[in-house]
Image: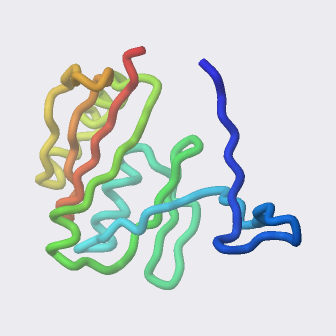
Amino acid sequence: MQMRWWRITAPGRADELGRHIVSKLLVTEIKAFVPARDFEVSKQFYRDLGFTMASEGGGVAYFRVGHASFLLQDFCAEALAENFMMHLLVEDVDAWWQQVQSAGVVDRYGVTCSAIETQPWRMRDFCLSDPSGVLWRIGQNTD
């Protein structure tokens, strides 16, 4: 497999020879702001799942696990929450499914959790809703 490297260029900017000028707009990370209907309940839900709350302030809590992270916000528009989806790519989907079961979050928070399925896009995954209705698809690549 050949790896291709791309340059980020500033739109419409070129030097005197017509070459595109490379921008310094390098990205180091992107995080989603996940809505929370009940901020305190949602914070505890994510801690129960195994996420670490690294910081909190101004109506936002920063959660992380391994190299993945997101921002939980003390704000919830129902239409957004019910149509919001997160994808967590993990090394061991069976361990994550077992963590959900052993943490008791389905009964404690009234959320849903599907069985693990093998998907045609070469992934084994399951779906878990959070207390606000946000759908998490937690999966592992099969190849």
Image vertical order of residue 66 relative to residue 52, above or below: above
Q: Residue furthest right?
A: 16
Q: Nearer the viewer, residue 10 or 84?
A: 10
Q: Position of residue 114 (x, y in %)?
A: 14, 34
Color encoding of the figure: rainbow
Image vertical order of residue 79 relative to residue 7, above or below: below
Q: Position of residue 88 (x, y in %)?
A: 39, 41
Image vertical order of residue 130 relative to residue 14, above or below: above
Q: Identify the residue shown where x is 64% and y is 22%.
A: 2
Image vertical order of residue 29 relative to residue 23, above or below: above
- Give the mark count: 0
Q: Residue furthest bottom?
A: 58
Q: Quadrant of the N terminus?
A: top right
32 left or right, relative to 35: right
Q: Position of residue 16 (x, y in %)?
A: 88, 71
21 left or right, relative to 25: right
Q: Nearer the viewer, residue 140 or 37?
A: 140
Q: Identify the residue shown where x is 61% and y is 57%.
A: 29
Q: Quadrant of the C terminus?
A: top left
Q: Nearer the viewer, residue 88 or 98?
A: 88
61 left or right, relative to 112: right
Q: Quadrant of residue 116?
A: top left
Q: Residue furthest front?
A: 17
Q: Position of residue 124 (x, y in %)?
A: 29, 23
Q: Identify the residue shown where x is 31% and y is 70%.
A: 35
Q: Identify the residue shown where x is 38% and y is 26%.
A: 140
